[in-house]
Amino acid sequence: MTEANIHQTKLNDITFFGLRSAIGIIFIVHGSGKFNPGFAGFLTGSLGMPPEMQIPIALAELVPGILLIVGVLTRISASLISIIMLGAIFYVKKASNLTGEGAYELDLILLAVALVIIAAGPGRASLAHIVKKLPRCLH
């Protein structure tokens, strides 16, 4: 039986950098869009949340997106993104079954990528790997 072994290779580094960058860019774009006053109206009108939650929600997407691209605090950032995606799937889109009726497929993919980053870490193409003095928990 053949076995794929990409651990500690350049392909592995490029793959993890690509995953981090893709999800980071998505969350930078989505997070910065939430600074729009219309998002506060969506929070109060559709979700019944106070408008004061606009800034924390926007920052909870924007900051982890930046940190993922840079490669610092990647597991913590991916964990925060996972929590956001679970909230988007079950609270915002009200997914109660897996039929796809809530249009939450993209949210599931983003959750899956965040879980891969949590499990695998940032890879060697990251600032955390370059700056070896950072404690391992900050990778």
Image: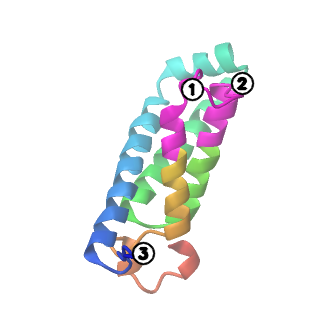
CA distance separating discs 2 and 1: 25 Å
**Residue beneath label 1, please?**
100
Q: Residues within 10 Å of mark 3 (few under 14, many from 20)?
A: many
Q: Within the magenta stretch, is there residue 79?
A: no
Residue at left offset 63%, top offset 22% = 43
Q: Position of residue 39 (x, y in %)?
A: 54, 22
Labelled disc at residue 33: none
Which label is found at residue 49?
2
Q: Nearer the viewer, mark 2 or mark 1?
A: 1
Q: Which residue is mark 3?
A: 128
Magenta stretch encompasses residue 86:
yes
Q: Which residues are magenta?
A: 85-110
* Side of 2 where 61 appears, left or right: right
Q: Residue at x 71, y 25 (%)?
A: 50
Q: CA distance from mark 3 to mark 2?
A: 36 Å
Quick check: 54 above or below 16? above
| SS type, badge 2 | loop
Query: Residue 20 in the image: x percent, y percent?
Result: 39, 57
